[in-house]
Image (tube, rainbow, N blue to C red):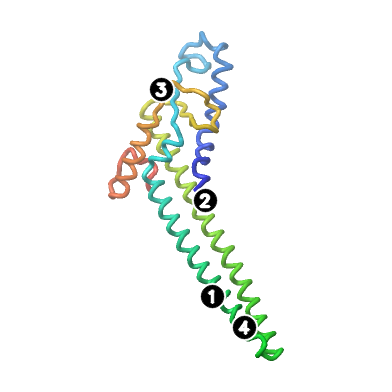
């Protein structure tokens, strides 16, 4: 799950470029009117603290726990298979002196195949878990960006930035911080989804 805080780096990445554009082009359009082709002087900007959103978003908490439980289950299954093979190898080593060359060779070949199969199984489990985490990351990204699109349309925001230690935003005034409101809206939409209620705020559900 260590990749989850990183996925919001993708969210509205273009918005950062737009912000710089507004900054460097602002002096050229200070006298622009509403009917001109210049950048509007009243662009509404807000930001969210991505770490806080991820920490308090119920959807992520529930699905992260589900993924962790699945990981533990698959790891235990692998350990059981590995222990079973280890026991077979130990039995072979104890009885090796009582076996003919043909019998020993057959057992060695069988154990070799089982070891290869165990390695393939381990790789399969790793890929399965990686796919599950990638899917969760994508679902999380889709949910947050879709919610922000609807939220921004309702509130009149044209740009929503992400603030965390890795972002390019070094400071944002408290009045621009919509983290709490967004987190609350995301959780309300998720609760409505779980209850089978079609909420207008839930722009992320079943689209």
Label whose residue precedes the other's in the sequence (1 or 2): 1
Q: Residue 203, percent across and down?
A: 38, 40
Judge left or right: residue 23 versus residue 60.
right
Q: Nearer the viewer, mark 2 or mark 4?
A: 4
Query: Disc 2, disc 4: CB below 8 Å?
Result: no
Q: Secondary structure at mark 1?
A: helix
Please give the residue where the numbered disc 3 appears in the rendered image.
174
How many numbered discs sit on the rendered protein? 4
In the foreground, 157 or 176:
176
Residue sitting farthest toward the top? 31
- Label 3 vs label 2: CA separation? 33 Å
Residue sitting farthest toward the right? 101
Q: Nearer the viewer, mark 1 or mark 2?
A: 1
- Label 4 vs label 3: CA separation? 72 Å
Please give the residue where the numbered disc 4 appears in the rendered image.
94
* In the rendered image, the vertical position of residue 49 relative to residue 137, given as above or below: above
In the foreground, 194 or 126:
126
Q: Nearer the viewer, mark 3 or mark 2?
A: 3
Q: Residues within 10 Å of mark 3 (few under 14, many from 20)?
A: few
Q: Residues within 10 Å of mark 4 (few under 14, many from 20)?
A: few
Label whose residue precedes the other's in the sequence (2 or 4): 4
Q: Nearer the viewer, mark 4 or mark 3?
A: 4
The image's mark for residue 134 is 2
């Amino acid at each position: 799950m260590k990749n989850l805080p990183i996925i919001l780096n993708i969210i509205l990445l273009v918005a950062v470029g737009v912000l710089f554009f507004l900054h460097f082009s602002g002096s050229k359009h200070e006298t622009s009117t509403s009917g001109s082709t210049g950048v509007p002087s009243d662009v509404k900007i807000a930001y969210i603290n991505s770490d806080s959103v991820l920490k308090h978003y119920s959807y992520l908490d529930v699905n992260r726990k589900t993924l962790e439980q699945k990981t533990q289950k698959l790891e235990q299954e692998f350990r059981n298979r590995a222990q079973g093979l280890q026991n077979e190898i130990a039995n072979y080593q104890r009885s090796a002196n009582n076996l003919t060359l043909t019998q020993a060779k057959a057992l060695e070949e069988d154990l070799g195949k089982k070891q290869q199969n165990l390695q393939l199984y381990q790789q399969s489990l790793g890929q399965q878990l990686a796919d599950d985490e990638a899917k969760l990351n994508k679902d999380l990204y889709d949910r947050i960006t879709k919610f922000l699109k609807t939220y921004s349309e309702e509130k009149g925001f044209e740009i929503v930035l992400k603030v965390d230690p890795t972002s390019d935003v070094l400071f944002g005034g408290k009045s621009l911080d919509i983290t709490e409101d967004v987190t609350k809206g995301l959780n309300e939409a998720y609760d409505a989804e779980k209850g089978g209620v079609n909420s207008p705020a839930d722009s992320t559900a079943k689209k």
